[in-house]
Amino acid sequence: MDDKVFNQESTDKYSLRGMVFTKIREDILSGKYTENEELKEITIGKELGVSRTPVREALRQLELEGLVKIIPNKGAYVAGISNKDVQDIYMIRSCLEGLCARWACEHITQEQIDAIEEVIYLSDFHVKKGHFEQIVELDTKFHELLYASCGSKILGHLLRDYHQYVHSVRKITLSDPARVRNSNAEHSAILEAIRNRDADNAEKLAHEHIIQTIYNINNHKLV
């Protein structure tokens, strides 16, 4: 979602509330707001072109997710994600991504296989050129396509949330040329297992792919 102003009059309050929530959430996870930074309702409302009410509701919802802490009579502040949170997210993702790859063996279409194959090909090209921004975008695209191919909206939604939670950490891990090359090779192996409808191997490879990311984080003391 970009920074364009929301049209409050053309959007019902439920959709508006959801958009405001999503935008603030994305800004927190992308690092636009730093930990302990105050989130001012008036400022955010002006930026998004909305009243304070949907901003206040979004902040309360974000407090339930643990991304925001609201201090009575003071305001709302960014809670951030702790080192343990990052480790937990990756461990949970390792299990869910394995399940996603297993289910993809049953539901993936040839069109989706071709799309993932193209992403891997483009990633190889940009890795050789050292194009960091494109590498991050293509990594996101690979996982988005994988999630879409599993045949489960619920699992896809969960994985997209976890993927976004570690956006900042992912950008750091994907700045390591060695890890990027290995990661793309792992993507290729996962796709090959799915293409062959080898559910056991696809699940194993997808699980190990995320575990390797955890090793990379720990080895480089990224969190």
Image (cartoon, grey):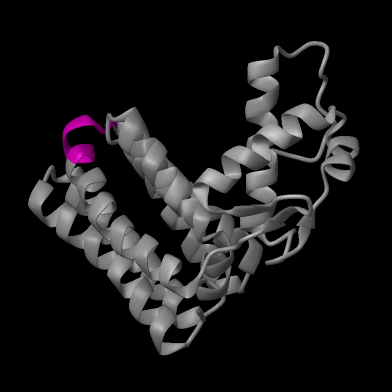
Image position of 207 (left or right of 143)? left
Reply above or below: 41 against 75.
Answer: above
Reply above or below: 128 against 206.
Answer: below
| Figure quadrant of residue 12 | top right
Question: What span is in magenta?
Answer: 103-109
Q: Residue at x 29, y 30 (%)?
A: 152
Image position of 202 (left or right of 179)? left
Front in this rendered view, residue 202 or 40:
40
Is residue 116 located in the magenta-colored stretch of the structure?
Answer: no
Image position of 34 (left or right of 119)? right
Front in this rendered view, residue 121 or 7:
7
Image position of 204 (left or right of 154)? left
Residue 48 in sight in this render:
yes
Query: Residue 108 appears at what percent x and percent y?
Result: 26, 33
Q: Residue at x 31, y 74 (%)?
A: 212
Please name the predominant secondary structure of the magenta segment in the image: helix
Reply above or below: 2 against 136.
Answer: above
Query: Residue 44 appears at what percent x and percent y?
Result: 83, 42
Residue 118 in sight in this render:
no
| Figure quadrant of residue 175 | bottom right
Which image quarter is the N terminus in? top right
Query: Residue 214 appears at what percent x and percent y?
Result: 36, 74
Q: Residue at x 66, y 55 (%)?
A: 28
Query: Residue 30 appears at what percent x and percent y?
Result: 65, 57
Total tally of numbered discs in the picture: 0
Q: Residue at x 32, y 40 (%)?
A: 113
